[in-house]
Amino acid sequence: MPFAQIYLLEGRSEDEKRAVIEKVTQALVEAVDTPRERVRVWIHEVPKANWGIAGQTAKDLGR
């Protein structure tokens, strides 16, 4: 059972997350020749204050 974990900064819409799940699922179906029913995708939403970029938080950088 393929299992993908995706880390994203908080703030994505439900439609955007659905699109990520669909496209990652399709990529795994094609890459490892598995039925889509066996694919699992877990999105981790990370608070901007907990995501560092070049020594600063994404929140401080206005991301």
Image (tube, grey):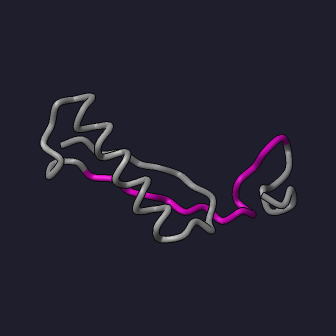
Type of secondary structure dominating the magenta stretch:
strand
Q: Position of residue 49 (x, y in %)?
A: 75, 63
Q: Position of residue 14 (x, y in %)?
A: 47, 71
Q: Nearer the viewer, residue 8 or 21?
A: 21
The answer to whether residue 3 is above or below residue 15 is above
From the viewer's perspective, tell me whether residue 57 is left or right of residue 50. right
Residue 49 inside the magenta-drawn segment: yes
The answer to whether residue 33 is above or below residue 12 is above
From the viewer's perspective, tell me whether residue 28 is left or right of residue 62. left
From the viewer's perspective, tell me whether residue 37 is left or right of residue 31. left
The mark tally for this picture is: 0
Q: Position of residue 62 (x, y in %)?
A: 84, 61
Q: Which residues are magenta?
A: 40-54
In percent of the image, x 22 and y 48: which residue is there? 39
In percent of the image, x 70 and y 59: which residue is there? 50
Rendered image quadrant of residue 8: bottom right
Q: Where's the N terminus, which quadrant? A: top left
Q: Position of residue 54 (x, y in %)?
A: 83, 40
In percent of the image, x 55 and y 63: which residue is there? 45
